[in-house]
Image: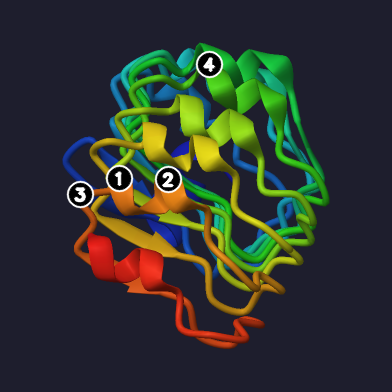
Amino acid sequence: TSDNENESAETNLFGNSIDLSDKNLTAIPAWVTKKTDLEKLIFEKNKLKNIPSSIANLRYLTHLNLSNNDLTELSASIGSLKRLETLDCVNNFLETIAPEIGNLRRLITLNLKYNNFSVFPHELTQLKGLRYFYLHANCIEIFPKEICALTHLKALGLGFNLLHSVPAEIENLVHLEWLSLGGNQVSSLPAEFSNLVTLETLFLNDCNFKRFPLEICEL
């Protein structure tokens, strides 16, 4: 069967977008990475374990959805997608991130919920333009102070990890509007928390507070 036949039988094409969701695929088809003008690729609900190096050919890609696959690493090849603005990798088995991911300087939204990270991937500190960052439901025990260097963040999701405390450096997130810390072992908030004057939505459900966190009252 030719590449063109595979393409027509298995793909939803919308302009410069390709949707290959829920196709039971174990690899990204070769013909996909030959579409060098592609802007959006949706590959969720498959059985992908590795990202081909040829994905670097998609230099105009701005949106990549790899959710609900079997990935254990975000590979170096993704770091070549310099125009990428949204990267969605919810519900994989991710534990590590290649250093090259730090090259995604245009990235605005990064969704890594429901993975296997036990420590914060240091490579992500290079993503200075990040606005929306979700790390819910991983296995992170220490609130990564490095996140507080991502000063353009508007939304930060760290709910349902294994966090015990929140660092004073959180006050550096001067544009933060939405914060989820629920489902952790946090029992107090630093005094500096009250400096998050732009915060509009805060989740602290299922934490270990012994008293009402008065720092919230000063927001």
Q: Which residue is mark 4?
A: 126
* Residue 51 in sight in this render: yes
Dots 2 and 4: beta carbons under 8 Å? no
The circle drawn on residue 192 is 2
The circle on residue 195 is 1
| Residue 143 screen position, x and y as percent | 67, 48
Q: Amino acid at mark 2?
A: Glu
Q: Amino acid at mark 1?
A: Asn
Residue at 59% of width from left, 67% of height from top?
Answer: 188
Q: Give 133 or 69, whichever is nearer the viewer.
A: 133
Secondary structure of the residue carrying tag 4 is helix
Where is the C terminus found, in terms of image quarters? bottom left
Give the spatial CA distance, label 3 vs label 2.
11 Å
Could you say whether the residue bearing mark 1 is in a helix, strand or loop? helix
Residue 215 is situated, as x and y percent measured from the top left of the image, at 38, 64
- C-alpha gap between disc 3 and disc 4: 25 Å
In the image, residue 145 sits, relative to residue 141, either above or below, namely above
Closer to the chain start, of discs 3 and 4, is 4
For disc 3, the marked residue is 197
Marks 3 & 2, CB-CB < 8 Å contact = no
Residue 138, label in figure: none
The answer to whether one can see residue 65 in this image is no
Q: CB atoms at circles 3 and 1 under 8 Å apart? A: yes
Comparing 131 with 1, the one in front is 131
Judged from the image, the secondary structure of the residue bearing numbered disc 3 is loop
Measure the C-alpha gap from mark 1 to mark 4: 24 Å
Q: Residue at x 76, y 49 (%)?
A: 142
Nearer-the-camera pick, 177 or 32: 177
